[in-house]
Image (tube, rainbow, N blue to C red):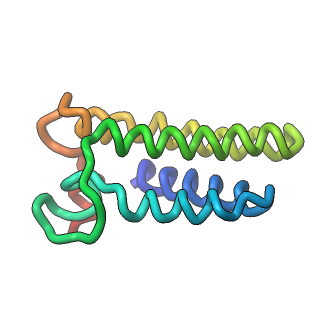
Amino acid sequence: MLPPLFRFLAELTTWIVLLITGYWYFTIVSMLTFALVNFNGDKKPKDTEMPGIYVRGWIRIAVELGFGLVGCGFSIYYFETIISIPLCTIILASFVLDRERWLWMLGKRVNPPAYVIYVHK
């Protein structure tokens, strides 16, 4: 269950960095994007009615990478190294831990990782 936990921590870290640096409107855009832009079968079982926009896997991955890198970049630019290193480490760890999910979203794996299936139960 580490990948979903680190993905949540990466999102939360990005939102906090954006709020602290005064870019609250980016926080709202990020929250709405993460809530509305979905890959079919990722947050809910496949073909389940869920509000939002279903996109291809690479689009969802680009959203996660983009906002993660924005959070990392803002933390490096606005904070001291002692603060930005742990924040960027959390974000980068979430990218590494999510590689199996991303492969599934790109169609390189037939079945989703076990933690995606477990979250649906």
Q: How many marks?
A: 0
Q: Estimate the x, y position of residue 25 in percent, counting from the top left.
A: 65, 62
**Residue appearing at x 20%, y 54% in the figure:** 40
Q: Would you place residue 83 above or below residue 53 in this image? A: above
Quadrant showing the C terminus: bottom left
Residue furthest top as drawn: 108
Residue furthest right as drawn: 80
Quarter of the image for residue 93 reads: top right
Quadrant showing the N terminus: bottom left
**Residue appearing at x 28%, y 33% in the figure:** 103
Q: Would you place residue 9 above or below residue 91 in this image? A: below
Quarter of the image for residue 98 reads: top left
Q: State left or right for residue 13 relative to residue 121.
A: right
Q: State left or right for residue 65 relative to residue 53.
A: right
**Residue appearing at x 70%, y 46% in the figure:** 87
Q: Estimate the x, y position of residue 60 in percent, counting from the top left.
A: 36, 45
Give 21 or 118, whichever is nearer the viewer: 21
Q: Would you place residue 5 above or below residue 85 in this image? A: below
Q: Estimate the x, y position of residue 80 in percent, counting from the top left.
A: 89, 42
Q: Estimate the x, y position of residue 107 in percent, counting from the top left.
A: 18, 33
Give 59 or 104, whichever is nearer the viewer: 59
**Residue appearing at x 30%, y 65% in the figure:** 52
Q: State left or right for residue 93 relative to residue 104.
A: right
